[in-house]
Amino acid sequence: MKKLFTVLSVLFVLGTANVFATGLGAQFGGNVTEGGNFGTGAAITFKLDKVPCVFAADLAFGSNYFAGGLTADWWLANPKIEGTWGYYYGIGVGGSVGFANSNYAGLSIGPRALIGTNIFLLDRVLEFYLQGAWQPTINIAAGDGATVNFSWVNFPVALGFRFWF
């Protein structure tokens, strides 16, 4: 059932992004968290027409867990360095939900401050980018017991591409 939900969720996001998107791509990255922990993953990234944010959505699942996350970043500026190479910075919000085994559920959410560099190729049709963010996070978990904690140390980084339509 979880796999069916995951497949349907991915198809929904892809279908919606294709119909209304002005940018669509993929990103790969990692996340440094408290204690020096480092996790990796991949996401679909998209920019919807008439919405000022750039989004990234990811899903992860295994035999005993399922997790999904979404970030929404509002670029405050994207000045050029030279030619089609530039940098950007902005603010946003990120969150995720996760379920493991039959007795764990977790929610994480936090604001984001980001900076990145990008280059446009093929007459601004293809964009490659590298970005980093600081995302202090509130974590709420329920399982054998409920916990709430806050972490100042959460630094996601991503390398990706987008096609612009």
Image (cartoon, rainbow, N blue to C red):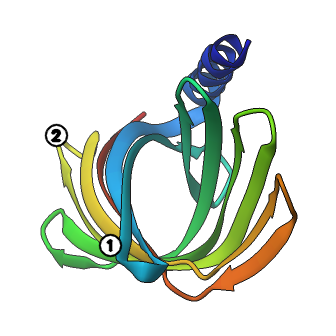
* Residue at 24% across, 76% down: 80
Q: Closer to the camera, 71 or 105?
A: 105
Q: Residue furthest front?
A: 144
Q: Closer to the camera, 119 or 38?
A: 38
Category of crowding for the residue at label 1, using alpha-carbon neighbours closer than 10 angstroms: few (below 14), some (14–19), many (at least 20)? some
Say what secondary structure mark 2 lies in.
loop
- Quarter of the image where the C terminus is located: top left
* Residue at 27% across, 49% down: 127
115 displayed left or right of 117: right
Q: Amino acid at mark 1?
A: Gly
| x and y percentages locating residue 9 in the rendered image | 67, 23
159 displayed left or right of 145: left
Category of crowding for the residue at label 2, using alpha-carbon neighbours closer than 10 angstroms: few (below 14), some (14–19), many (at least 20)? few
Foreground: disc 2 or disc 1? 1
Disc 2 or 1, which lies upstream in sequence? 1
* Residue at 51% across, 42% down: 46
From the image, tell me which residue sits under label 2: 122
- Quarter of the image where the N terminus is located: top right
Q: Is residue 18 above or below residue 35?
A: above
